[in-house]
Image: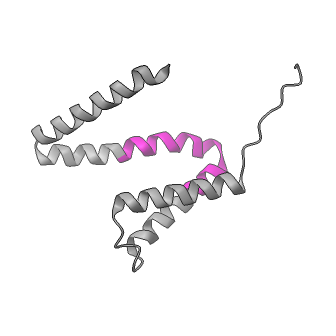
Amino acid sequence: GALITAVPMWALGTALGISMGNILPARIVSALSVALFGMFIACIIPEAKKNKLVAFIIAISFLLSWLFGILPGLKDISEGTRTIILTLLIAGAAAALFPIKEEVDDAA
């Protein structure tokens, strides 16, 4: 049910973003790209403040991202592909090493 609204809105937002990216001056588009990173940081910092494990995984993510950008062979991979690889590696490792334990409802 949620997809009925989410998918068309995602497509509309993408189309508007592409259109605005072609209309707006390059300086503003560049500034908005930086703002996107700021938005992602704003999403992770509150959880990192509450959970030291999340903060550790974020720090490891920053380190690995930096290493992938400077190491021979890895730095030649496109940024998008590096992001996908790192996301899968880090999220997979974190999920395997630190699974979230679900609470069991004894009322049933």
For residue 44: magenta?
yes
Q: Does residue 108 lie above or below 57 as drawn?
A: above
Which residue is located at x 69 percent, y 55 percent?
96
Q: Nearer the viewer, residue 106 or 67?
A: 106
Residue 73 image point, x, y percent: 39, 78
Considering the whole magenta stretch, tell me its main secondary structure: helix
**Residue 6 can be seen in this image:** yes
Would you say 69 lies left or right of 52 here?
Answer: left
Quadrant where the C terminus lies?
top right
Name of the residue lying farthest toward the bottom: 72
Residue 25 image point, x, y percent: 10, 43
Residue 71 image point, x, y percent: 42, 77
Q: How many marks?
A: 0
Which residue is located at x 64 percent, y 55 percent?
94
Q: Specify how the rendered protein is coloured.
A: one colour
Q: Point out the stretch of residues depicted in magenta.
A: 37-59
Q: Does residue 92 lie above or below 1 as drawn?
A: below
Q: Nearer the viewer, residue 32 or 45?
A: 32
Residue 33 image point, x, y percent: 27, 47
For residue 56: magenta?
yes
**Residue 59 can be seen in this image:** no
Which residue is located at x 72 percent, y 43 percent?
100
Would you say 99 lies left or right of 33 here?
Answer: right
Q: Does residue 18 lie above or below 108 as drawn?
A: below
